Amino acid sequence: MQKEYIDKYYMTEVDTYDNSIYCHHAVMGEGVTEHSHKKGQFLYTEGGVVFLKTAEKSYFLPARHYIWIPSYVKHSIHPSSPEVVMRNLYFPKYDTDTEFFDKVNIYPVNDLLIELIMFTNRWNGNIFPEEEPRYSIAKAFKLILPELSHTELPLALPYPKNEKLKQIITYLEQNIAENISFKSLAEHFDISERTLARLFQKELAMSYIQYFTILRMLTSLKLLLDEKLSVNEVALRVGYNSLPTFSNTFNKVIGVRPSEYVKNRNLLL
């Protein structure tokens, strides 16, 4: 069956009816420019990494994870490949909504949620409250998310506003395989270690080590998914000579070991 590429006009239909749940499944193509919705958005993707940008952060959405985007949050979506499949469900607010639905966050997907996601594949467009039992089933999908999503993952990096720190971040991205000490980084940019430490905390709310570690792990996800490199090759590409150290760090940040992740990367593609 030929894949149907995403029709950008569907976005104008999402909020046409305040009380409907809107479903859309399609191949992404070139991505989606900045926009927002009155409804909250559940987004699950297959076939590669998706980069989702808000005003505050850049999020990395890999396979076997979903992102929840609250209503009115402006965002743009950029797939790593035009063949990435996007599965969207847009929900109105309910009186029963908890604070879970007020934050942008990424969560791992377990087998039960994957079954539910695949079940939604039969839906497309608006589902109205009078369409029972479809509406109740779709609504239950939203209500069950907090019960299935206990571990939010730090698959996001904040944007620095400081120009010097922007240059530093670019330098780290371009030299991801190098073991750059905090002292050598400060010397390279002719800045004191104390000032640099303050910059990271003030602008990014994390230390240099925390930032560089997460940057390396997110880069690892992209290499594993898009370039299909082995775990050992990826470890070396992001500056780890010790495979056990890389595996332990990946597990701590991502929630699974890289070998496990590789086994699951072709799931549902």
Image (tube, helix red, strand yellow):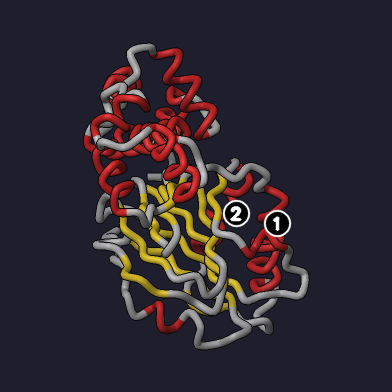
As helix, strand or loop, the secondary structure at mark 2 comes to helix
Quadrant placement of the N terminus: bottom left
Which residue corresponds to the image point at 38% horizontal and 52% vertical from the top-left?
Answer: 160
As helix, strand or loop, the secondary structure at mark 1 comes to helix
- Horizontal and vertical percent position of residue 162: 35, 54
Residue at which label 1 appears? 144
Label ID, residue 116? 2
Query: From the viewer's perspective, is 267 left or right of 41?
Result: left
Q: Compute the Cα span from label 1 to label 2.
A: 10 Å
**Whether residue 264 is visible:** yes
Query: From the viewer's perspective, is 86 left or right of 18?
Result: left
Mark 2: amino acid: Leu
Looking at the image, residue 123 lies above or below residue 210:
below
**Residue 140, picture quadrant:** bottom right
- Horizontal and vertical percent position of residue 118: 52, 54
Mark 1 or mark 2, whichever is nearer to me: 1
**Residue 237, picture quadrant:** top left
Query: From the viewer's perspective, is 90 left or right of 199?
Result: right
- Horizontal and vertical percent position of residue 136: 70, 71
Looking at the image, residue 202 lies above or below residue 127:
above
Depth check, front residue: 139 or 133: 139
Tag 1–tag 2 contact (CB < 8 Å) = yes
Of mark 1 and mark 2, the one earlier in the sequence is 2
**Whether residue 266 is visible:** no
Mark 1: amino acid: Ile
Which residue corresponds to the image point at 55% horizontal and 87% vertical from the top-left?
Answer: 17
